[in-house]
Amino acid sequence: MRYVLCLLFACFLLAALFPPARAAAAEPDVDDAASAVNAFAIDIYRQLAAEGGNIFFSPYSISSALAMTYAGARGETAEEMADVLHFTGLGQDVHAAMGALQHRFNAIPEEMGSLNIANRLWLDKRENLTPDFMALMKEFYGADAGVADFLNDYDTERVKINDWVARETRDRIRDLLQEGNVTPETILVLVNAIYFNAAWQVPFDRLLTRDEPFRTGRDEQHDVPMMNQTRFFRYGENSYAQLIKIPYEIPGLSMLILLPRENEDFTQMEELEKQLTHEALASWRADMGFSRVTLRMPRFRDEQRYALGDVLQRLGMNLAFTASADFSGMVKEPRGGPPVHMDFVVHKAFIELDEERTEAAAATGIGISVTSARIEPEPVIEFNADRPFIYFIIDEETGLILFMGRMEQP
């Protein structure tokens, strides 16, 4: 009996000194979040492509800003937003994943380049955010809420928001919010800003840049500065396009170019865009190998601004823009009780690339208002981007599309 008691005491003592380890918290699934952003990117691209011309935007910025808004949505409003953003099935874990992605990008050492993401909220001084929403914004998006007087001084507040965006994007995104975006009915503005600046892993030689024709149609062309280099690249091709990946000094980040093949009408751009899905893009990227390629591509600069309210509604995000919207998880007791809704979603993006580097920036603003394998060397492959092409800036580890564009007129 004494032996049994001693044994029990020993077990108790061991349990007290060495308690069982707690199960590690599940890591947020950044790959699922990246897939959601990419699927949304292609949806937005298709909508913008129908209007023609150059395209450039940051799907990551738009998704981040809308994810913050989605955190305050409830009921059918949340269901619609989740469907359009491809968050269905991810639940609230999407915020932890988006936060993990943001932390990963903001942790890049400055000597390698810049990839900085910032979020901020401006709340009318008469309103209150729910404690849960405020905690989520701070924990996962690093977003503080500043106090604003939209009722009495809405245009001054608009300028303050624009100044913040300009600072966060190194003055590349100016006047994000235009006159008429912010009104006395505005109670909350959520903003995401992203800034990217990185050198090519292997720069182009400026002495090899020449003015050469860039074709915009079967019988239309104009001269632009065309950069040139020959070396081993990640390269792939299919029946619709040639693909090339140009790495940056920041490890894991690269520019991917899809150059449509030519046909009797001019190029297969229309067919390529029909085939382009986030699954197809992932498959095409996986099939790329190393080849020796002579790359010619234009030096260019582009800037675009989009009002995305109509685009999002065409994709199915309707309730959020109406008096029937449910954002009860965001705003507490809004101004005596009137419902709140999304009033505007605006996005502005900038890119400039040359022989040494790429600089890109984007910002998204949302207004909430009350109702009222290796390939053996072959002969050098020609990749001559002398006609319209689609391009991406991608995080290789997750596949996340940070920026996406179509260049028709350099």
Image (cartoon, rainbow, N blue to C red):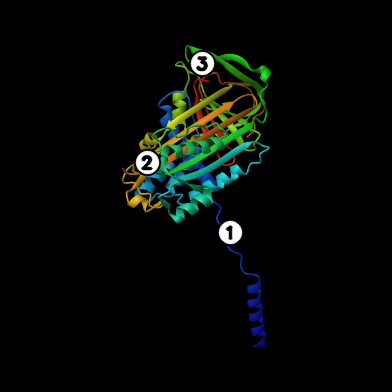
SS assignment at label 1: loop
**In this rendering, does residue 286 appear at all?**
no
Find residue 260 and report its horizontal and vertical position in percent.
51, 23
| In contact (CB < 8 Å): disc 1 and disc 3 | no
Residue, disc 2: 184
Mark seen at residue 24? 1
Farthest-out residue, front:
152
**In this rendering, does residue 307 appear at all?**
yes
Mark 3 is on which residue type? Arg
Q: In this view of the protein, which residue sits in the foreground, 15 or 129? A: 129
Q: Quadrant of residue 105?
A: top right
Query: Which comes before the other along the chain, label 3 or label 2?
Result: 2
Find residue 144 and report its horizontal and vertical position in percent.
51, 48
Residue, disc 3: 215
Point 59% across, 26% down: residue: 353
SS assignment at label 3: strand
